[in-house]
Amino acid sequence: MTFLELKDLRIHFPSDDGLVRSVDGLSFRLERGKTLGIVGESGSGKSVTSLGILGLHKGGRAKISGEIWLDGEELVSASAEHVRTLRGKKMAMIFQDPLSAMHPFYTVGAQIVEAYRIHHDVSKKVARKHAIEMLDRVGIPQPDRRVDSYPHEFSGGMRQRAMIAMALSCDPELLIADEPTTALDVTVQAQILDLMRDLQRDFNAALIIITHDLGVVAELSDDILVMYAGKAIEYGTSEDIFERPEHPYTWGLLGSMPRLDRERTERLMPIKGSPPSLINVPPGCAFNPRCVYGDRTGGRSTTEVPELLESEGGHLVRCHLSRDERRTVWENEIKPNLEAS
Ligand SMILES: Nc1ncnc2c1ncn2[C@@H]1O[C@H](COP(=O)(O)OP(=O)(O)OP(=O)(O)O)[C@@H](O)[C@H]1O
Ligand code: SF4
Ligand SMILES: [Mg+2]
């Protein structure tokens, strides 16, 4: 049985300007022990998707449809109360914004202790010891003292580590890490990624790593899902995405990847133009205003929404160009350029 499966998930927010289609028909599967990277520019719906899986839009303004199956249970139709009981042990999230995940009025230790004791029948003393261990594992100095600090007493980077300790404290079976490392220095980034790998190995956990930088997920992910304007536009194994990518947007992301052999801030070729409005999504392919290949599809790019179709062996692509055209462009135009730059 697939551990996590999304089927045609839609998360729309009514607003004064119209309906914001943040997630618009997203489907994917994830097995235990596997890592999925979700990649896309700012505003493509990555965080809204993760919050949706955790049930955190329930009771809000969001209109949610589709299905989220976690370990045999459907969560879109489940009660907010029930989904809450799954958070912590069954699934947990490392949030992009640590403050949103922590209560300002309780010490960091108290929050870890509380989360741990919901799922483990242990004394406060034992839970506190566990909290100190977790803080130590994420690299917080003097954890036996810092356990009694409040979130605001931590620096940004420390707060992020504390939140990671919180998320990992119950050994979740599904861990979603939303841009987990951007605010951290390189050494700590590596420590955190190691911790996540330990979790995966020790508990056969399923991981989702969310980022706008393909480089971050290159080594970690088994599969990669590229999102654009609330939809998957390409999905495949890490190898599919890096060795034989077929979507023009993915080519753009590869081209704009920071290179290890250069200054971290240097980007090769940023994708021209900006992400579309999610209220007035461009007709046809949402990427068409920025795509230089749209004129090769006989007008379909601006009139017809492309479907996400299988190219080969589970590699899915949402583009009107034929498979042969995409492969030819990749081999002859894009790949040599990337290699040369
Ligand atoms: N509660 C909300 N109400 C209305 N619109 C929302 C809400 N939450 C998110 N959105 C909109 O949904 C879109 C997708 O947001 P989301 O946070 O998922 O993007 P993201 O891919 O995580 O981007 P980033 O890389 O910047 O974190 C954005 O246009 C955002 O403004
Ligand atoms: S469908 Fe057209 S506009 Fe969209 S990515 Fe393919 S070629 Fe470009
Ligand atoms: Mg986000």
Image (cartoon, helix red, strand yellow):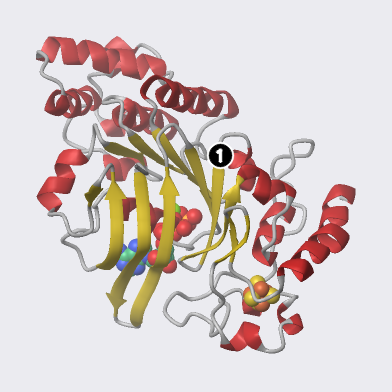
Determine whether, in the image, residue 130 is placed left or right of residue 78: right
Q: Position of residue 61 (x, y in %)?
A: 21, 68
Ligand 1 under 8 Å from disc 1 Cβ = no
Foreground pick, 151 / 238? 238
Displayed quadrant of residue 208: top left
Foreground pick, 242 / 215? 242
Q: Residues within 10 Å of mark 1 (few under 14, many from 20)?
A: some
Q: Tell me the quadrant of ligand 1.
A: bottom left
Query: What residue do we see at 56% from left, 85% from top?
Result: 304
Foreground pick, 271 / 248? 248
Give SS at disc 1: loop
Determine whether, in the image, residue 316 is placed left or right of residue 103: right
Q: Is residue 231 above or below residue 120?
A: below
Mark 1 belongs to which amino acid? Answer: Asp
Determine whether, in the image, residue 30 is placed left or right of residue 261: left
Residue tagged 1:
222
Q: Position of residue 34 (x, y in %)?
A: 47, 36
Query: What residue do we see at 78% from left, 70% from top?
Result: 325
Query: What residue do we see at 24% from left, 53% from top?
Result: 56
- Is residue 220 at all visible to an observer of this figure? yes
Q: Position of residue 200 (x, y in %)?
A: 43, 27
- Is residue 290 at all visible to an observer of this figure? no
Displayed quadrant of residue 87: top left
Query: What residue do we see at 69% from left, 61% from top?
Result: 246
Count of marks, rendered view? 1
